[in-house]
Amino acid sequence: MKKIFSLLALLLVFAMLFAACGGDGTTTTSSTTASSTTAASTTGTSASTGTTASTGTTATTGTTATTGTTGTTGTTATTGTTGTTATVTPTNPDNNPVMPDAKKSLKILAIGNSFSVDAMEHLAVILKDAGYEEIVLGNLYIGGCSLTTHKGNIRTGAEAYEFYTNTGNGWSSKKSNIESGIIFAEWDVITIQQVSQDSGKPETFTYLNDILDYVRTTASEFNPDVKILWHMTWAYQGNSTHSGFANYGKSQKTMYEAITGAVKSDIIPNGRIDGFIPSGTAIQNLRTSYFGDTLTRDGYHLSYDIGRYTAALMWYKQITGADISGITAVPDKFPGIAEHLPAIKEAVNNAFANNLEVTKSEITEFEDELLVMTDADKAHLTSLGLDPAKYEVLDLNLTLKGYYNSTDTKDWGKVKTTAGNSKQFIATGIFTPQVLPAGSVINIADGYQYRLEGWQMLGTKNAEARLDNSKADMVLDASYYDKYNFIAFNISKLDSSEIVYEDRTAFRIYVPIAEEKPNEMTAEDKAYLTAIGLNPDNYEKLDLDYILFAYYNCNSNINSAENSVANNLVNFISTRTFAKEEIPVGSVIRIDKGYQYRPEWWVELGVSVPGSARPGNIVGENDTNYKVVDDEWWGSYNYRGFNVAVQGNGAVVSEETGTHFVIYVPKAN
């Protein structure tokens, strides 16, 4: 009999949803005090008083709801159905965990989009580590899916979703409609979220209450105690190119505050929702640590390792309230997460305790164990007759299970991670002679080998024959840089077995510690300033911190010193970026004859300047070519960086190239 009544209630919901939508999903409900789609208590339990609403729905919190009359109890929540005043009371205003007593079983469904994929990707790993034996995770996924689209799919029953499921051993998927996903399991928790670009715009939550009522009614047939949570997503990376970032003035701070503001105004007061998961706050907290603003892979989706793991741990913490100090498991594919767990856990715990405000991290520096000069390192250098105090360990920027082939016909300078034999290798980063100078010491452990790969230009096939693998330590000879401008290494085991995380320590490089060169005014500098009518005693040279083989492009937000294989890198040397106060009005920019520079500009670092003409090259036409900085030179920009090249952009640059571009700044009074 219970099932018959539940079926009738469900049919009534569909009929009323259709009527409310006018059949096309574009018309919202009329002014009524109780949502016209509610067929069961919005607190997840049946009304205890037996009072019946005149619309035929079960009254919420036992209050009689009559059409056109505002209920007498509860908090008024206006979001969800346009023109509808819903008399529902927040069930969890303090956002306490909703499954604190869950021990061995947990079943969670997300009705979402790619941001729910990000958040749930590593959740099973965490739950298994926490001792859960029965795990069922589901994700009804449509890329970029909004609340409006979910509402439309409820109305039509369209099999528009890719339904991902995971019982602890990886994800599988099939096509599904929303109802099939909801009745797939006796879900303990179901989450709902808005599409990311609208997550801070509560005016787009028009259909939220309709969706909530449908989800609870459908799910309650299998679990009347199901908890419905709002997934509070994250703000975009500061340099994101997502078109929706314009909704927030392309400001991460503005977007985060809008997202939390929407939760305060429209989620917490909504009694249909049992709480929210503050993934956005956890990510924002972690951005104040040593990670900085590096937690996405494309400016908005989370990074596959740290970003996704942080969101998953936040889900576990918020849903269960459990102590996460003992969580140590990380995905096999991303073993490096383990060394960052202290910062991740700090961010999650702080978001749990203070879920709508950023808590600054106390972990602002990370000491990579691979960069520590160990006693074994010192002993090795000493055995070669070298002074360990004059060397430091090079950051190798390792990619596990990947390799280079400098003579391959494509992807020159890129790590191959999908080849059949990729699992047998570790690839280092790519180094220039500035970073890996001649005289550096290479140390390979017993049982391993390495191959030196080299390129004249990245993005261009290496014309030299590939070098053989080597099992021997060596001191890097300058002759390698007669052949190559860029060098990298592949590391593998002699038995060709699969690489594991612990193999990272098998290959070490020690580089000579560069001597500090004082950036002092030389006699030549003083003569130059005197020749153009300035008093050298009033100026000092700016430290430009050159990067060899790199350039900026402010219009496309490129700094080719990072992750680029452009084949023209060898033609440029770039400075660091400078704030306006570092190059004040009155500074003198000098370029020597035969050289040129481009003064790139930004309003905000990490944000490109599309639509603004890129500044042109300034050519040194004579021996006293210079520019005195004025207000017009800075204009509306707050930052500058410089590309320096031999005139015509055709020659390979060197550190010597940088001596032909100088900036003199006025001494502070």
Image (cartoon, rainbow, N blue to C red):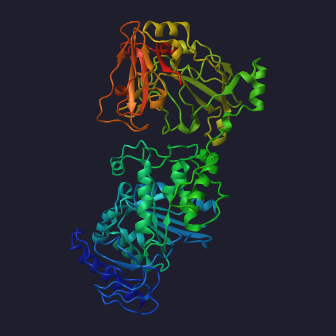
State the image coordinates of residue 136 (x, y, percent, origin top left): 52, 66
Residue 111 seen by the camera: no
Q: How many numbered circles does the render carry?
A: 0
State the image coordinates of residue 206 (x, y, percent, origin top left): 31, 67
Task: Tell me what residue is drawn at x 49 percent, y 37 percent.
Answer: 419
Figure check: 433 above or below 275: above
State the image coordinates of residue 478 (x, y, percent, origin top left): 59, 13
Q: Relative to 141, is 374 on the left or the right?
A: right
Q: Quadrant of residue 96?
A: bottom right
User: Relative to the observer, which residue lies in front, 497 or 356?
Assistant: 356
Figure check: 419 above or below 631: below
User: Relative to the observer, which residue lies in front, 634 or 245?
Assistant: 634
Residue 303 seen by the camera: yes
State the image coordinates of residue 164 (x, y, percent, origin top left): 44, 60
User: Relative to the observer, which residue lies in front, 430 or 426?
Assistant: 430
State the residue lying farthest toward the front. 669
Task: Tell me what residue is drawn at x 31 percent, y 63 percent.
Answer: 149
